[in-house]
Every structure is written in structure tokens, then in C-alpha cells.
């Protein structure tokens, strides 16, 4: 099950990724306004000394979105290739001769309501696959394809995260946190570059991006002012891509003159050269090019047989092509070269290469970290398609520590324990004795580093305030000489004194009066949120200005989430009891009967939440609106630390509403009825352990009786 966790303390709110459907765009994710652009007055730089004529494709944002193509020169003239289905936004990239893109729809409140991953056959100009997505993390600002690792990367438009995307399914996987980039581009050597906004100068700034850790190294300012909002905090959508024809980085954006223009960016300095404004102010996203055709008589690709890496060198074993691109026997080769990184000069050339011959080369100048190579063969007819090899040298970046747990010691301080990673992010083995760790603590969404250069596999947080109840989360990150790896999954625990009975929480002013309330999204983006009004049923709180709402109306069937109370002490209670108001709605007479329901669960002393038998509340069990529910919990009397969870299950139907939660001790058992007729129809009976009993077998004593609208304690005499 996929889970995410949110601490709900002074202000209760669901995370943005769950708001209003599939999520919401981050503030900087927006297209340029569809207004007339001013003419660009910048002077064009002199063209490069090259005969290459890079042709690009991209999606034009207009009333009829379409893929258009243009030559990246000083008078680009986009030509429409094919129309696309109208959506709110797009991002994509080419893989070989196919174009993959993610589109999405947004409602009036800015919430993402639909996401689709699509594949376009650029030869036939048709969409050959369309796959709806359940999550919005793959909605990206920009995408690129890294040929060295056969990976599509993107910058998520819902969070500042580098993601990788499965081209078959469209599923996006977070890789690492990074800067809020507007573009992401991979060169032929596999190096990622991103352009971000400098909010002070409002200029774009070029960075190199580590595709393993997400860390970014500033190269320099482009010198180009982006079109931003009034505060200069957010810019419009844009895109950048490398040309396979000349290896240069091209960038299209709407600049501060409100002109949609084309630039060429120097990746060694970051400076951008203005080329031209698009003639009809075409606003492009998803810039890409397609592989250039290879002459039929040119060599087929070089075959990379093996790549080995050590501390300071890389060895590549490869075989020269034996046939032409068309499959005919290759008579001769004139060149066989290996290029290091993005260099235009060969690092190694085979003297007198022979078709079909195997070779071996060791790069003794490999640098620590990621090394990539391009292998190209040539003859009188032309060059072969490029082959790629890559390897990681030196000590690897660590994988995330695993099995992270948090428990409290005798003083109440959290003790964090973990298992060291055995391998690095590039697959190299790690020496656990050479690892160091940093610890981050997150309280109420505020994340801070509390310890660095820790050795061993545990740490006690003695800096935490134990005078009040909290629920801190901890992340553990390992480091080697290469740098920091990925942080672990979050692990947390309750700390501080438990609340004593009675505990009352009615969210009267729209916020909890007790803390912390913990929300866990358990599956398919399920979520509880604090609200003054639910979508459906359209009801306000039972009392006050707030209530808890489990999102069912906008959720998918199968979504789950739990929200849990702060710790409560039952140590001196003899008959603890939970009361709350639940909104019952039965619309089965209108063929609207959904199995959305809520199960009450209990955690004892930080253990797993376990369902209370018989405490399963189906929304359609009655049509009584706000109804008080009473749940005795005598089996937990005497326990020191109790957390009560409300586990919502969506059936794709309606929201579940919860309010006016009270936990108290009721020694008398609150006898509401006596001399009850056991055979009363439509009633269910439970003993004080919560076990269901047969009404015909009741003996004198205390019981719990449930009917369609009430739960009450009775005595049989």
C-alpha cells in the first residue's frame, strides 16, 4: 500500500497533492497569458560556425493545441504537424521516433482533475496509446530523454522533484528533490541541465543537475528576463532541449517583453543568445527533435559489449559494426571513435578499424562520479548512429537507509534506529564503516537538520521539547566521500505527556484545540481534511466552524486514509467511552448506494492500529444526517497511551463527515435501557469486549445494542 503522512496540529489541512482531485499545480506552473506579444528588439548573436540545421518539434499552446515543427535559426517559421486533444497543459519528450507526453485538465479552482500519458507515432502522426493516470506527480514543467540510461526525466509541476517516467505505463517515480526548475534537458552524454528563475533579477539561470541526488550546480545567468507575475516569483511555462544535429541547447520562452522567442544557451557559461521571436507568438512546450536519417551505406551502430568501472578508470569493450545501416556487409571503416562526455574531440580513436573486430579501451582520465561516452563509426557514406556507454567511478552515492524505526526511551526521548545501505545508487557496494549520517526532524511540516556526521546506526534526539505532546518525523540520510545519498522514508512516534480524560475536540474555530492529529494517506491518495463544508453531502459541521471530512466524492474507489487523535491516557479509567457525531446518508432509493464507510481503530503504546470489533460505520446504514454514535472501549481501561484512529474507506461515492469527538470515562456504563426485548428486529448486540452475540442467547448483564440510527448500552435482567 502506498502511504503518506501528514501531521495535523494547529491548523488541519490536507496536502496539496490530494486537494480537489488528483492534486494542484505548484504556484509556478502556469502557461503564458494568451495576449499579443511585443516585438523583440534584442540584437541577434552571430550564428555558430556550423552547417547543421537543427529541426525541432514542440507543442504549441493555443485554442487548438498542436505539434508544430520549425528550424532553429534566425527566422523560425513553425508549421503545424498535427492537432492534439485540448487540455489545460502538456509536457513531453521524444524517445527514438516516438513522442511521449503527459497532458492534464484543471478545474476553476486550479485542482488537477485528469491526467493522461500519451504516445504519438511521429511517422504516421497518430496517437497510438493513451493511458489515464491516478497520480499527478507525473504532470511536469518539462521533460527530457537521457539516452545513456534510457530514462525519461521530468520536473514535477506539483512539487520541486525530479521524477523518472515509465514510458509504457506513464507511472512517475520521484528521484530526488531539486530546485524549482522550469526546464530540464539531457545532453548526448547524459548530463542534465535545468533553468530556474532568479526572483531578484527575474532572469533565467542555468544549472547542471545531478540525476542521482537532484543537487544542482549553478553555471551562470542566461541574461534573459522571464515573463513573471508582479512579484517576480513565478514565470510562465517554457522548454529547452539539445539538438542532436549540433549538440547545442535551445530554449523557447515568453520573455519580459511578452514575446515568445527562441534562444541558444551556452552550457559552459549559462549565457543565452537571442535568435528570433516566433512570427505568430507561438508559445512552445515539450521541445524535442527526432533522429536524423542515416545513409543506407553508412555503418550500423557500434556494439557496446561491456563497461567496467574502478576507483579512477573505466574500461569499455566494444565491437565495430560488420554491416551497413541497411544490413549489407560492410566493406571497410574509415573511423571508430569514442567521445568523452559532451566533448567534440575524440578521447580515443581506433587505428585502422576493421568491420566486426572487437576492441578494448581504458579511460585512465575518468573522473570520480558519473562518466559517459559516445561511440561512433564512419566510412565514406557517413557516420553510424551513436552508441552510448556510461559508468560510475569512485565511491558511490549511498542508497537510502532502511528499516528506520522510532521508539522512546525511559526518559521519553525518541531513539531513531536504522539499517545501513549495502549498495549505492549506481549499484556499487558500500563499506558501512565509511558511512556517516545526518538526521532531519519534521514537526508540523517544519523540517530541520538536528545531527550530522553521525556514525553507527542509531541516534537519540535529546533536543526535543518533551513538555508537550508532539509527533516528530525523522529522516536518515547516509553520506560517502561522493556526497549525500537519498533520505530514508519518514518514521515517527508520539512524544510528550498523553492527554487525560475527558478529551473533547469539536474544531469549534475551524482548527483542532488539541494536538497532534495525525493523517495518514494509506492507499490511492485517500485523505481526510478539515473543512467548513463538504462537497457531497453538502453539509456544514455539526457544531462550530470545522469538521473532519474523508474525501470520498472526489476520490477513486479503494482510496483509504486514517486520521488519529493525540495520545490519551486511560490509566485511571474504568469504563472509557468514545462519542462522536457521524453523518448518515442513505440514497439507495435513488440508486445511489455506495459502501463508503469508516472503521474506528485503536493503537496502544505506539503499536499498530487495530480495528475495534463492531465499530464499522457505513454511511448508508441510515438517513438521519448528523447522528451521535457511542462506542464503549472498556477493553482498553488502564492503558497509559491510547490513540484512536478513524479509518476512511472510499467506494467512489460520498464524503464521510465526522465531528464533536469526545472521549471520557463513564463508570456507570451509562445504562440507557432496561428489560430490553432481545428479539427486537434489526438490532445487533455486542458484549463489553466488542464481540457480537446472538440476541436469543443473551444472559443477564451489560451489552451494546446497535440499530440503524443509534448505539447504546443496555442491561438485561
Image: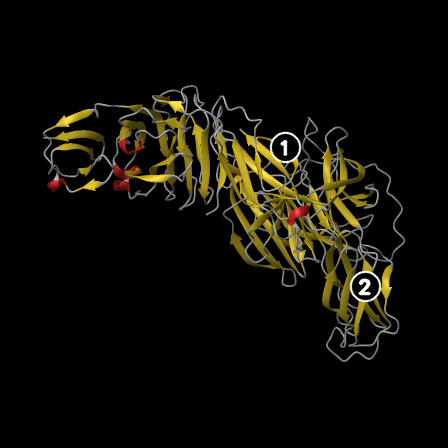
Q: Give the total number of marks visible in the rendering.
A: 2
User: Within the image, what quadrant is residue 129 found in?
Assistant: bottom right
Residue 675's label in the rendered image is none
Q: Residues within 10 Å of mark 1 (few under 14, many from 20)?
A: few
Residue 384 as seen in the image, left or right of residue 626: right
Q: Locate residue 68, reporting x and y percent.
A: 69, 52
Q: Quadrant of residue 141?
A: top right
Q: In this picture, is 542 found above or below 302? A: above
Q: Position of residue 285 (x, y in %)?
A: 67, 46
Q: Nearer the viewer, residue 409 or 554?
A: 409
- The residue lying toward the viewer, choosing from 524 and 497, is 497
Question: Could you tell me residue 649's position as x and y percent?
Answer: 37, 41
Give the position of the C terminus as an image quadrant.
Answer: top left
Task: Identify which residue is drawn at 28% across, 34% down.
Answer: 635
The residue at the point 57 percent across, 54 percent down is 118
Side of 497 where 633 appears, left or right: left
Above/below status of 624 relative to 247: above
| Mark before the other along the chain sequence, 2 or 1 | 2
Q: Write down the quadrant of residue 562 in the picture.
A: top left
Asked if residue 118 lies left or right of residue 527, the reply is right
Q: Position of residue 525 (x, y in %)?
A: 47, 42
Q: How is the protein colored in the picture?
A: secondary structure
Q: Is residue 596 above or below residue 632?
A: below
326 and 674: which one is in front? 674
Q: Which mark is residue 362?
A: 2
Residue 188 shows up from this direction:
no
Q: Name which residue lies at 40% across and 46% down.
A: 558
Secondary structure of residue under mark 2: strand
Which of the pair 91/671 is nearer the observer? 671
| Alpha-carbon span between mark 2 and mark 1 | 42 Å
Residue ID for mark 1: 449
Badge 1 element: strand
Amino acid at each position: 500500500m502506498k502511504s503518506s503522512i501528514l501531521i495535523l496540529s494547529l491548523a488541519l489541512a490536507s496536502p496539496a497533492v490530494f486537494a480537489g482531485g488528483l492534486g494542484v499545480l505548484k504556484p509556478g506552473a502556469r502557461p503564458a497569458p494568451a495576449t499579443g506579444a511585443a516585438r523583440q528588439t534584442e540584437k541577434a548573436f552571430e550564428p555558430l560556425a556550423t552547417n547543421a540545421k537543427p529541426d525541432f518539434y514542440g507543442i504549441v499552446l493555443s485554442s487548438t493545441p498542436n505539434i508544430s515543427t520549425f528550424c532553429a535559426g534566425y527566422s523560425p517559421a513553425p508549421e503545424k504537424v498535427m492537432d492534439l486533444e485540448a487540455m489545460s497543459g502538456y509536457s513531453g519528450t521524444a524517445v527514438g521516433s516516438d513522442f511521449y507526453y503527459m497532458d492534464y485538465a484543471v478545474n476553476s479552482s486550479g485542482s488537477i482533475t485528469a491526467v493522461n500519458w500519451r504516445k504519438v507515432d511521429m511517422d504516421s502522426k497518430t496517437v497510438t496509446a493513451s493511458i489515464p493516470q491516478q497520480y499527478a506527480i507525473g504532470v511536469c514543467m518539462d521533460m527530457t530523454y537521457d539516452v545513456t540510461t534510457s530514462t525519461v526525466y521530468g520536473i514535477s509541476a506539483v512539487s520541486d522533484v525530479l521524477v523518472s517516467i515509465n514510458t509504457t505505463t506513464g507511472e512517475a517515480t520521484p528521484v530526488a528533490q531539486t530546485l524549482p526548475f522550469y526546464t530540464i534537458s539531457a545532453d548526448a552524454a547524459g548530463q542534465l541541465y535545468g533553468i530556474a528563475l532568479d526572483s531578484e533579477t527575474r532572469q533565467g539561470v542555468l544549472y547542471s543537475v545531478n540525476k542521482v541526488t537532484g543537487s544542482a550546480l549553478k553555471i551562470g545567468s542566461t541574461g534573459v528576463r522571464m515573463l513573471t507575475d508582479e512579484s517576480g516569483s513565478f514565470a510562465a511555462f517554457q522548454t529547452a532541449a539539445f539538438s542532436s544535429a549540433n549538440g547545442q541547447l535551445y530554449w523557447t520562452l515568453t520573455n519580459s517583453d511578452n514575446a515568445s522567442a527562441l534562444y541558444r544557451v551556452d552550457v559552459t557559461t549559462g549565457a543565452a543568445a537571442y535568435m528570433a521571436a516566433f512570427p505568430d507568438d507561438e508559445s512552445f512546450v515539450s521541445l524535442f527533435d527526432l533522429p536524423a536519417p542515416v545513409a543506407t551505406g553508412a555503418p550500423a551502430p557500434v556494439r557496446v559489449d561491456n563497461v567496467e568501472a574502478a576507483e579512477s578508470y573505466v574500461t569499455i569493450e566494444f565491437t565495430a559494426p560488420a554491416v551497413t545501416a541497411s544490413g549489407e556487409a560492410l566493406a571497410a571503416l574509415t573511423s571508430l571513435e569514442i567521445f568523452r562526455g559532451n566533448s567534440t574531440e575524440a578521447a580515443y580513436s581506433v587505428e585502422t578499424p576493421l568491420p566486426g573486430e572487437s576492441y578494448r579501451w581504458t579511460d585512465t582520465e575518468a573522473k570520480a562520479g558519473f562518466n559517459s561516452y559516445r561511440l561512433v563509426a564512419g566510412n565514406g557514406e557517413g557516420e553510424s548512429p551513436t552508441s552510448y556507454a556510461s559508468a560510475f567511478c569512485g565511491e558511490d552515492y549511498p542508497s537510502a537507509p532502511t528499516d528506520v524505526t522510532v521508539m522512546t526511551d525511559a526518559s521519553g526521548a525518541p531513539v531513531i534506529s536504522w539499517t545501513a545501505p549495502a549498495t549505492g545508487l549506481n549499484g556499487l557496494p558500500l563499506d558501512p564503516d565509511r558511512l556517516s549520517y545526518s538526521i532531519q526532524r519534521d514537526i508540523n511540516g517544519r523540517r530541520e537538520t538536528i545531527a550530522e556526521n553521525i556514525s553507527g546506526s542509531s541516534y537519540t534526539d535529546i533536543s526535543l521539547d518533551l513538555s508537550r505532546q508532539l509527533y516528530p518525523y525523522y529522516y536518515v540520510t547516509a553520506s560517502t566521500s561522493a556526497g549525500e545519498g537519498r533520505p530514508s522514508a519518514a518514521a515517527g512516534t508520539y512524544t510528550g505527556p498523553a492527554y487525560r480524560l475527558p478529551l473533547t475536540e469539536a474544531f469549534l474555530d475551524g482548527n483542532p484545540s488539541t494536538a497532534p492529529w495525525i493523517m495518514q494517506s494509506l492507499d490511492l491518495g485517500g485523505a481526510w481534511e478539515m473543512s467548513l463544508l463538504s462537497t457531497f453531502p453538502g453539509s456544514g459541521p455539526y457544531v462550530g466552524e470545522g469538521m473532519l471530512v474523508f474525501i470520498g466524492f472526489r476520490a477513486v474507489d479503494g482510496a483509504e486514509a486514517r486520521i488519529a487523535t493525540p495520545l490519551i491516557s486511560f490509566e485511571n479509567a474504568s469504563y472509557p467511552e468514545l462519542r462522536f457525531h457521524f453523518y448518515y446518508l442513505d440514497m439507495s432509493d435513488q440508486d445511489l448506494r455506495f459502501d463508503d464507510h469508516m472503521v474506528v481503530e485503536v493503537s496502544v503504546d505506539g503499536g499498530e492500529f487495530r480495528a475495534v470489533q463492531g465499530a464499522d460505520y457505513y454511511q448508508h446504514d441510515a438517513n438521519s444526517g448528523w447522528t451521535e454514535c457511542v462506542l464503549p472501549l472498556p477493553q482498553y481501561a488502564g492503558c497509559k497511551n491510547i490513540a484512536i484512529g478513524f479509518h476512511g474507506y472510499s467506494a467512489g461515492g460520498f464524503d464521510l463527515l465526522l465531528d464533536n469527538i469526545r472521549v471520557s470515562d463513564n463508570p456507570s456504563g451509562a445504562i440507557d435501557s432496561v428489560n430490553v426485548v432481545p428479539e427486537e428486529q434489526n438490532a445487533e448486540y455486542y458484549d463489553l469486549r466488542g464481540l457480537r452475540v446472538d440476541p436469543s442467547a443473551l444472559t443477564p448483564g451489560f451489552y451494546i445494542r446497535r440499530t440503524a440510527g443509534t448505539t447504546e448500552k443496555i442491561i438485561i435482567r
